[in-house]
Image: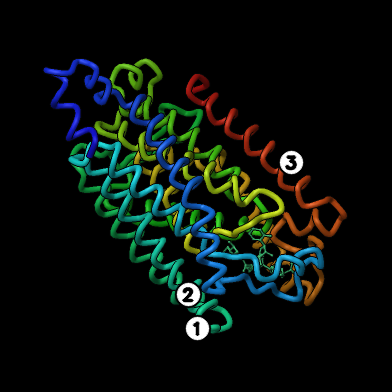
Amino acid sequence: MLYHLLFPLHTSIPAFNVFRYITFRTIYAGLTALVICFFLGPWVIRKLRMLQIGQYIQEDGPASHQKKAGTPTMGGSLIVAAIAISTLLWTDLTNYYVWILLFVVLGYGFIGFYDDYLMLIKKRNKGLSIKEKFLWQTVIALLAGLWICVTPNFSTEVTIPFFKRISPDLGWGYILFAALVIVATSNAVNLTDGLDGLAIGPMIIAATTYMVFAYVAGHARFADYLQLNYVSGCGEAAVFCGALAGAGLGFLWFNAYPAQVFMGDVGSLSLGAALGTVAVITKQEILLVIVGGLFVVEAVSVILQVGFFKMTKGRRFFRMAPLHHHFELKGWPEPKVCVRFWIVAIFLALISMSTLKLR
Ligand code: 57M
């Protein structure tokens, strides 16, 4: 909005020329989202407390989690609002990708919100059933996939990291592929969100990484130089990533150990879906396995644990899944697990950045 309101004035106020630049708008999108979370955070936490939207803690989890009972949850509503407001303020609103990203964040935010609402307010034990949640996640992801595919000049080829000459064209099958990436990322982030700061830290790191990829892929000359798939207009996704990273940092202020608020499904489902969508739009879909490697490892730990449990009729591969619980039960204090997982996420982000040169 600011871009549309202020950039046209650059003929009389030359300083407003700066609104043209994606880099400038990305920085300010980040700062705006951060400031929104920072200032509204205490108010949101107070409201959630007043409404008694406190976390119920399962008894079979690590004992250290019992003291977290009653911590306000659904703080993800603040993240979603901060991302949406900042994106609306700083992006070029004629850009298709901006609307696709907003559609996904708000759509998944709504599913998560409804799930949290059933669980906490209506006190229905488990919220939406797994089938219901999966169905709505798939519907939104398929619509987003279709929208992406019909965006002018969008290529349905898949980029394989490190192999610039191999890029299979999926044609209309790309819609299914995009939906798979979005749904899987959303659920992987949801599984990771089990310790203070554990999901939001790697989310900030992944958003920052994709901010770079979106900027480069949307810049014809840089994309050509780095031999990336050029995606006309995807530079605006960098501004969105700025908002994502900024909102994440603002939320982390309150979610850092010991957390004053949890994000709830409204946060974890929407953030994961946003990340998946950015990966698709920037045409770095498979690279997400490295950028979001930590989320992948957490999800795989659950698959392994459940598979092993069923095959061996009750034996466990890890002390408890997802993986962060395994380390907690080994005696690592919660902040140590969290910071070490962040270090792994930074390591993976750097490896993924190296694919800009290694190909
Ligand atoms: C949600 N939710 C957290 C909070 C957060 C199939 C199975 C592996 C599914 C899995 C599951 O349900 N995962 C998805 C995980 C919960 O956090 C809430 O949920 C939101 C995210 N959706 O925002 O509102 C708890 O996590 C802790 N937490 C923090 N700090 C935070 O910033 O400490 C969350 C955010 C909170 C709080 O304690 O209550 C969760 O873990 O429930 N299920 C599990 O993860 C369960 N694992 C399990 O059953 N493992 C089995 C195998 C056979 C599947 C095993 O290993 O034996 C674990 N979760 C719990 N207890 N609570 C283990 C048992």
Cα separation, mark 2 vs mark 1, equals 7 Å
Q: Which mark is residue 340?
A: 3
Q: Secondary structure at mark 1?
A: loop
Q: Are marks 3 and 1 in contact (CB under 8 Å)?
A: no
Q: Residue at x 78, y 77 (%)?
A: 313
Residue 336 as seen in the image, left or right of residue 221: right
Q: Earlier in the sequence, mark 3 or mark 1?
A: 1
Q: Residues within 10 Å of mark 3 (few under 14, many from 20)?
A: few
The residue wearing badge 2 is 117
The residue wearing badge 1 is 122
Q: Amino acid at mark 2?
A: Tyr
Q: Is residue 299 visible?
A: no
Label 2 or label 3, whichever lies nearer to me, is 2
Q: Are marks 2 and 3 in contact (CB under 8 Å)?
A: no
Query: Residue 98 placed where, x, y %?
Result: 28, 44
Q: Nearer the viewer, residue 46 or 87?
A: 46
Q: Is residue 307 visible?
A: yes
Q: Residues within 10 Å of mark 1 (few under 14, many from 20)?
A: few
Q: Are marks 2 and 1 in contact (CB under 8 Å)?
A: yes
Tell me the quarter of the picture where residue 279 sits: top left
Q: Secondary structure at mark 3?
A: helix
In the image, residue 341 sits, relative to residue 138, either above or below, namely above
Q: Residues within 10 Å of mark 2 (few under 14, many from 20)?
A: many
Q: Quadrant of the N terminus?
A: top left
Q: Amino acid at mark 1?
A: Lys
In terms of image quarters, where does ligand 1 lie? bottom right
Cα separation, mark 2 vs mark 3, equals 32 Å
Q: Residue at x 40, y 19 (%)?
A: 226
